[in-house]
Image: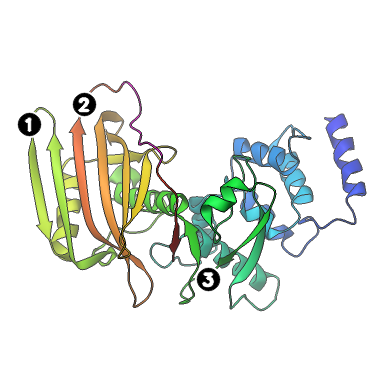
Amino acid sequence: MLKNTCLCRTLQAESSSVMSLLHSIYEAGVRGLLEMLDSEALLALARTSTNNRILPLNSSEAIEIILLHTPDLGRFFSYRRLSAQTLFLYLHKYQVPSMGFANKNQMIMAVKDLWEKQCGRKAVSKPTTLKRRASSDPEIESPKGTQVEKNIANDDTESEFDVTPFAQPIVSVIRSDDFTRDFCEWYFNMVNRLQPVCAHHIGDTFREDIFYSNSFADIYFIGHSCGEKHAQGRDNTYALLRETFMAYSLLFSPNLENGTQAFKSDHGLVKICCCGTLHHKNALVGIFEQESGLVCSPVDRAWKIMYIKINLKQSNTLCERPSLPPCQLFEIET
């Protein structure tokens, strides 16, 4: 412990002239956000921030290392361990509302606005350009808002992306894989909260207005007995999904790592595919495959669900977790 502590102090002295989040106006906010992460995530972030040059011994030391060796908020928010769900929980803690399905970029801007207000400064009212360095490090997200294929190929170039605040009709860009993970995490967390066992989880509320008025749903049951159910219209679609999930007490565990795909039509519809496991309380009862069609509303630029098609497959045994092959990445305006 003494050796690592001395090393941190030496590096801190050598880095006194280099930009750092430590002793910056954002230190308190960043520290509070980091304290919401588990020890595994903190240790991984500390290693990433120092390019594996320092291995922290505990969570407290990891936080100090991250603060010292992260130069600015652009770098900080590029860490993949800072997921959309983590940012959502942080905003909820400070009673900052999330307006429906907000993507990670919008949450980043809301967190930054919160920190500006806590510092007594004027909140950000226009998009802020954050610089990121493209990296192959799995803990660092690749840049958004520029050509996706170019960013993946050129690991040594800096890129910029715009992040937009909540409730502002300013267009930002997000990568399709990030958009897909954000949507699936938001949607299935919301659906799981219908069950009493998950009602205490923090998340959005499953409701009619996440669907278009002419939306539809198709549910297919595959197992010992097969069947299907269909609904047309917003209210009927919502009611069918809710009643089905409640009747069978279904819980969904989507495979967010390698069980999602996204495809874009020429007319703007984004098709999201996701698979995962089905649960009934503490029992594994099968797998699911869902296809969702999303369209961005021109009124408020909110993404709403046009249709949902879902296969519910009963199975008492599972050899491996359901997954989907990789698909081509593209950019989505939000």
Graded by Cα atoms within 10 Å as few (under 14), some (14 to 19) or many (20 or more), the crowding at tag 2 reads some
Q: Which mark is residue 225?
A: 1
Which sits earlier in the primary sequence, circle 2 or circle 1? 1
Q: Would you say 277 lies left or right of 80 here? A: left
Camera-side residue: 250 or 308? Answer: 308
Camera-side residue: 129 or 60? Answer: 129
* Residue on which the image places disc 3: 165
- Describe the element under mark 1 as helix, strand or loop: loop
Tell me what residue is drawn at x 49 percent, y 57 percent.
Answer: 88
- Describe the element under mark 2 as helix, strand or loop: loop
Query: Where the C terminus falls, by quadrant?
Result: bottom left
Q: Quadrant of residue 45?
A: top right
Q: Which mark is residue 315?
A: 2
Magenta span includes 320: yes
Camera-side residue: 144 or 205? Answer: 144
In contact (CB < 8 Å): disc 2 and disc 1? no
In contact (CB < 8 Å): disc 2 and disc 3? no
- The stretch of residues the image draws in magenta is 319-326
Tell me what residue is drawn at x 70 percent, y 71 percent.
Answer: 119
In contact (CB < 8 Å): disc 3 and disc 1? no
Graded by Cα atoms within 10 Å as few (under 14), some (14 to 19) or many (20 or more), the crowding at tag 1 reads few
Which sits earlier in the primary sequence, circle 3 or circle 1? 3
Q: CA distance from mark 2 to mark 1?
A: 12 Å
Q: How far across and how far down the image is residue 330, in percent? A: 44, 54
